[in-house]
């Protein structure tokens, strides 16, 4: 007999041998991790440091705080680190070093060696349209107590206080907001405009600006209202830049709160998009808005809404001079950031960042400056006519005098138009030989 010889093997025995080989191979193979930490990002805010772990899927974790030396430990179950911790910027943070290791075979342990004491808090965020699953670690500084409000609305200091304008640059940090051509980000554009509005009010006698967000970090929508309240604000103006699925949408707009429903389909769409910022920016939503539930229908809300609509109309009128309006009246919708029952609040959309033409303008310092001036002029003109009773502006109005400090770009004719007086009366009250004025010069504004 010729041919190749094959040893005899039954079908049953063959299957058993194969199964045994596979089992032995699994014992010798390295442990497979179920999840990945794809990236680690850090944001620094004035009172805390935020670290975001981008996950490939939801994961359970444990937060541990240790002393002697001070360390923060985060254990993430069944997870492997794919990011490089050495590339995370730690300057101006309470963290001295970040390191990692494997615990219990397949759990990731991240250790933060601290150089100053913090109070840690952690929570998870589910995947959404813009971001995947995330684990957020907030480290609140213990050595940075919140500064007391600079203005107290009290009897002892009620005769000539400044009018406080809380300026809120939307989005920030983890939440870039809308995106435009060439990588333009809403969070950067609106912070630029907000800083310009702040500078304009800082030069005004009788006004005091307060910045809700001073850098590239995220502030929760409810927290923005709380910060405005802590600053004893007389107004909260939240600055944004629109985006829509069609690049043809364009124009500026102003919004106030609605208790009954949106004034248009687009207003409802925009409110839903802006209210979703907490899901992107990273805010634990376990707590409920008890404050709003208690006071939303308080009688003071009616007065607040009336003031918001009046202020919004003034800002809209000034924006109409420099840009096309998306809506010719103040619209209303249920914006979370506007739900302060005791502080008039408006949301200003400075243009459509999704529109290439308007994005090009919003990118420039010149247009940001024009938009800031429109917001400033509208807010100021309202408060000059409706000043809170305990303010310097109210005292000046009562006594027939008002003061204005000349800012860059001002002309005598524009100032006269803003205060509803004539150029001749301005020159007469200030003994001006001509229409020439200079930056920093103080003008007395006649009452009529």
Image (spheres, helix red, strand yellow):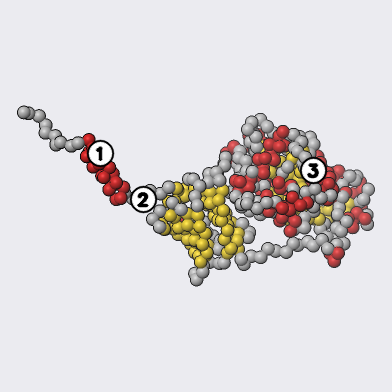
The secondary structure type at the circle numbered 1 is: helix
The secondary structure type at the circle numbered 2 is: loop
> Relative to 143, does residue 368 appear above or below in the rendering?
above
Q: How far apart are labels 3 and 2 at the CA level?
A: 61 Å
Q: Which residue is mark 2?
A: 31
Q: Residue at x 91, y 54 (%)?
A: 397
The answer to whether any part of residue 276 appears in the image is yes
Q: In this rendered view, identify the residue nearer to me: 178 or 209.
A: 178
Q: In this rendered view, identify the residue nearer to me: 114 or 68.
A: 68
Q: How far apart are labels 2 and 1 at the CA level?
A: 25 Å
Q: Is residue 186 left or right of residue 234?
A: left
Instruction: Return the residue found at the far bottom.
Output: 68
Q: In this rendered view, identify the residue nearer to me: 367 or 76.
A: 76
Q: Residue at x 60, y 63 (%)?
A: 141
- Label 1: few (<14), some (14–19) or many (≥20) C-alpha neighbours in 10 Å: few
Q: Residue at x 57, y 61 (%)?
A: 120
Q: How many marks?
A: 3
Q: Nearer the viewer, mark 3 or mark 2?
A: 2
Q: How far apart are labels 1 and 3 at the CA level?
A: 78 Å
Residue 252 point in image, percent of width and height = 73, 38
First in sequence, mark 1 or 3: give its number.
Answer: 1
Q: Quadrant of residue 210?
A: bottom right
Q: In this rendered view, identify the residue nearer to me: 338 or 353.
A: 338
Q: Which residue is mark 3?
A: 312
| Contact between labelled residues 2 and 3, with CB atoms less than 8 Å apart | no
First in sequence, mark 3 or 2: give its number.
Answer: 2
Residue 18 point in image, percent of width and height = 25, 41
The answer to whether any part of residue 175 appears in the image is no
Disc assigned to residue 15: 1
Disc assigned to residue 402: none
């Amino acid at each position: 007999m010729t041919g190749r010889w094959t040893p005899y093997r039954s079908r049953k025995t063959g299957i058993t041998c194969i199964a045994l080989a596979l089992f032995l191979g699994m014992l010798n193979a390295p442990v497979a991790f179920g999840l990945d930490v794809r990236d680690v990002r850090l944001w620094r805010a004035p009172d805390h440091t935020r670290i975001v772990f981008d996950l490939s899927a939801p994961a359970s974790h444990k937060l541990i705080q240790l002393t002697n030396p001070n360390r923060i430990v985060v254990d993430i179950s069944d997870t492997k680190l794919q990011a490089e911790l050495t590339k995370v910027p730690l300057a101006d943070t309470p963290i001295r070093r970040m390191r990692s290791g494997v615990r219990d075979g397949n759990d990731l342990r991240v250790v933060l060696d601290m150089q100053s004491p913090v109070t840690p808090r952690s929570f998870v965020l589910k995947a959404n349209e813009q971001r995947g699953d995330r684990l957020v670690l907030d480290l609140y500084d213990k050595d940075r107590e919140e500064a007391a409000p600079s203005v107290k609305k009290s009897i002892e200091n009620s005769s000539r206080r400044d009018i406080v304008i809380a300026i809120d640059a939307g989005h920030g940090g983890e939440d870039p907001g809308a995106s435009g051509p060439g990588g333009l980000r809403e969070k950067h554009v609106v912070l630029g405009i907000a800083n310009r509005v702040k500078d304009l009010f800082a030069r005004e006698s009788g006004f005091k600006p307060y910045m809700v967000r001073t850098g590239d970090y995220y502030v929760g929508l409810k927290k923005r209202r709380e910060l405005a309240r802590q600053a004893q604000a007389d107004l909260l103006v939240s600055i944004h830049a629109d985006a829509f699925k069609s690049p043809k949408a364009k124009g500026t707009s102003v919004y106030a709160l609605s208790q009954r429903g949106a004034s248009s389909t687009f207003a409802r769409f925009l409110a839903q998009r802006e209210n979703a910022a907490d899901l992107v920016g990273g805010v634990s939503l376990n707590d409920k808005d008890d404050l709003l539930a208690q006071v939303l229908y308080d009688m003071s809300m009616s007065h607040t809404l009336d003031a918001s609509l009046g202020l919004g109309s003034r800002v809209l009128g000034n924006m109409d001079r420099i840009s096309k309006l998306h809506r010719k009246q103040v619209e209303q919708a249920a914006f979370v950031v506007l739900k302060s029952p005791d502080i008039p609040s408006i949301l200003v959309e400075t243009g459509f960042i999704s529109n290439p033409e308007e994005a090009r303008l919003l990118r420039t310092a010149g247009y940001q400056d024009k938009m800031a001036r429109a917001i400033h002029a509208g807010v100021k003109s309202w408060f000059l006519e409706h000043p809170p009773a305990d303010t310097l502006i109210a005292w000046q109005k009562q006594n027939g005098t008002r003061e204005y400090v000349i800012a860059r770009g001002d002309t005598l004719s524009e100032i006269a138009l803003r205060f509803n007086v004539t150029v001749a009366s301005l020159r007469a009250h200030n003994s001006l030989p001509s229409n020439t004025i200079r930056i920093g010069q103080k003008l007395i504004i006649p009452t009529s």
